[in-house]
Image (spheres, rainbow, N blue to C red):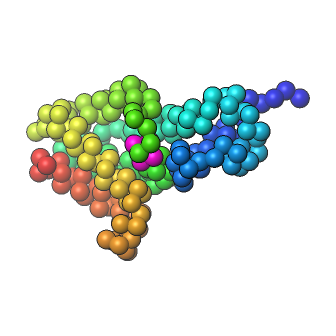
Amino acid sequence: MPWDTEATRRKLLDAATAQFARVGLAGARVDSIAREAGVNKERIYQYFGDKGGLFAAVLATEVEHLLEGISVAGNGASALGHVAGALHDRVAMRPHLARLLAWESLELSEPVSAESRAEGCAAMVTALADALPHHDRAHAGELLLSLISLVLADRCLPHVTALVAPGSTTSSRRAAVVAQARALAATGG
């Protein structure tokens, strides 16, 4: 029976995603990832080079398309609110994204897939600048950064969330993020 390389890669990426989200690059162990995937650890070295290559592959697979498919609908404050809601929904369905982004920033000197991710961010900034008539491109970029920070904050800082807003739920947090995004766009802040 031929070896299913793609299935093996997928098992390793799935196991590595879970472990890297939990403990980051430095805390992850190749033996543990291989065991969780049910694959010989030599496959990690064969397919990804080393643990750092596996981390980069996980990041490229998981976070490279963070904004992909999220459209800017409408104009003005409601447009930014729409993006906030859509991004919140994506991160709520894939909570490991926030932690992987945090680990990437903590452990790597530069982002993985920087060029393609920058292109995706630039496209979103352009769409926001077009939808927000009183904001130039630079300000639209600042709004997008603030929006991403709002969406990721409770996922990256769950203890702070529990202390500051102990009754917060996914739906209440979504409503708050959408309202805050609309307020940011409406005030020019």
The one of 23 and 9 positioned closer to us in this rendering:
23
Q: Position of residue 83 (x, y in %)?
A: 32, 45
Residue at screen point 56% across, 50% down = 27
Q: Is residue 123 left or right of residue 12?
A: left
Percent coordinates x, y for residue 4 in the rendering: 77, 30
Residue 39 higher or lower than 159, as above or below: above
Residue at point 31% right, 29% down? 123
- Tell me if 132 is positioned left or right of 112 in this view: left
Residue at left offset 54%, top offset 52%: 23
Q: Residue 172 colored magenta?
A: no
Residue found at the very far front of the displayed protein:
26
Is residue 178 positioned above or below 125 on the image? below
Q: Quarter of the image holding residue 11?
A: top right
Q: Quadrant of the N terminus?
A: top right
Q: Is residue 157 above or below residue 149?
A: below
- Secondary structure mostly seen in magenta is helix
For the point 62% across and 32% down, which residue is it? 50
Query: Where is residue 6 shown, x and y percent of the image?
Result: 70, 31
Magenta-highlighted residues: 101-105
Residue 95 in the image: state x and y as whole percent: 48, 53
